[in-house]
Image (cartoon, helix red, strand yellow):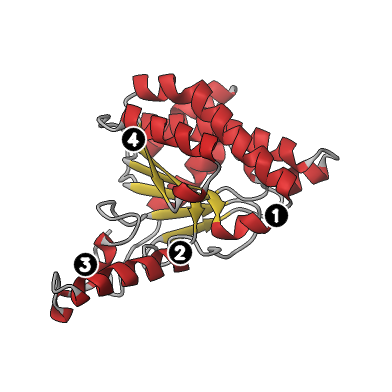
């Protein structure tokens, strides 16, 4: 019996969710899931709404996916919230995104903290508006000792800039005789990225139908499994069932890391 038929046999969403969670938990989980939350603006435009309405609905989905990730036992969840390229968008849309970020953190921080969730950011958050920066720092400080799901929020983040920044820092250390050129290897580079100390993603999910990674975690996703939604599934419509389908698809892939799976191996 395939996965979708298992779901269809249940009568309520609650039952779907319970059975699906049990099925997913019975198999090896991705340690780290990353998500490109794409399609907020297009979702709103399709409904004749301002683009800000799509971002607001998208924020509500974040809560749902964080909760599901924590319940499953996933250790790291990285969310692409605002890229270095997103500054090119209309000023009103950027203002709305930053306002929603502040609103979300103020509303959800206590619950996130109670649930042992740790908030971390990757990217150059010092360039964000002051009020957003302050709320982010408060969230980071409040949850810093938590040991449950770690949510990495990519804000003012760009993969190429991240790599350039790492190269500059490594070069500075070589110039100051803190490092030798022979010390430079993949581990050293990884540790100088924004994600230093965080394992590479096992699974990258992108909603909205586009099949590209859009300057996201370029170094880290060398062997990450990619899952793209169809063009009709925008982030505001993404739900736990879609999330579990993506994880289930991941669980049924063979990860070879450039090698060969021997006959008889799972």
Residue occupying image coordinates x 67% and y 49%: 39
- Where disc 1 sits, the SS reads loop
Q: Is residue 112 above or below residue 265?
A: above
Q: Which residue is mark 1?
A: 89
Q: Are marks 2 and 3 in contact (CB under 8 Å)?
A: no
Residue 34 point in image, percent of width and height: 44, 50
Instruction: Choose mark 3 or mark 1, whichever is in front.
Output: 1
In terms of depth relative to the viewer, which is nearer, 56 or 90? 90
Tag 3 residue: 188
Mark 4 or 2, nearer chain start: 4
- Which residue is at 39% across, 63% downward? 221
* Callout 4 crowding tier (Cα within 10 Å): few <14, some 14–19, many ≥20: many
Q: CA distance from mark 3 to mark 1?
A: 35 Å
- The correct choice, above or below, for 213 with respect to 244 in the image is below
- Nearer to us of marks 1 and 2 is 1
Nearer to the camera, 172 or 8: 172
Decide which of tag 1 and tag 2 comes sooner along the chain: 1
Label 3 – label 4 distance at C-alpha: 25 Å
Label located before the other in sequence (1 or 4): 1
Residue 199 image offset from top left, x and y in percent: 28, 53
Label whose residue precedes the other's in the sequence (3 or 4) = 4
Label 2: few (<14), some or many (≥20) within 10 Å? many
Q: Which residue is mark 4?
A: 149
Question: Mark 2 — residue?
Answer: 159
């Amino acid at each position: 019996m395939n996965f979708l038929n298992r779901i269809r046999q249940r009568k309520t969403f609650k039952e779907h969710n319970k059975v699906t969670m049990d099925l997913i938990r019975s198999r090896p989980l991705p340690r780290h899931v990353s998500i490109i939350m794409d399609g907020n603006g297009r979702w709103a435009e399709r409904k004749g709404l301002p683009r800000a309405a799509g971002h607001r609905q998208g924020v509500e989905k974040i809560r749902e996916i964080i909760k599901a990730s924590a319940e499953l036992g996933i250790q790291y969840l990285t969310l692409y919230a605002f890229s270095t390229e997103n500054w090119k968008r209309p000023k009103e849309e950027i203002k709305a995104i930053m306002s929603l970020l502040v609103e979300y953190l103020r509303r959800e921080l206590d619950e996130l903290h109670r649930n042992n969730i740790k908030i971390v950011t990757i990217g150059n958050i010092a360039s964000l508006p002051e009020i957003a920066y302050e709320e982010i720092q408060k969230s980071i400080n409040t949850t810093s000792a938590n040991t449950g799901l770690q949510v990495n929020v990519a804000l003012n983040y760009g993969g190429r800039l991240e790599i350039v920044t790492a190269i500059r820092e490594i070069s500075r250390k070589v110039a100051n005789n803190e490092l030798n050129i022979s010390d430079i290897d993949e581990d050293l580079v990884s540790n100088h990225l924004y994600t230093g100390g965080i394992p590479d993603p096992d699974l990258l999910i992108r909603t909205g139908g586009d099949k590209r990674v859009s300057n996201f975690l370029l170094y880290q996703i060398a062997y990450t499994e990619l899952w793209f939604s169809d063009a009709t599934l925008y982030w505001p419509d993404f739900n736990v069932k879609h999330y579990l389908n993506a994880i289930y698809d991941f669980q049924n892939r063979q990860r070879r890391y450039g090698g060969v799976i021997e006959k008889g191996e799972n």
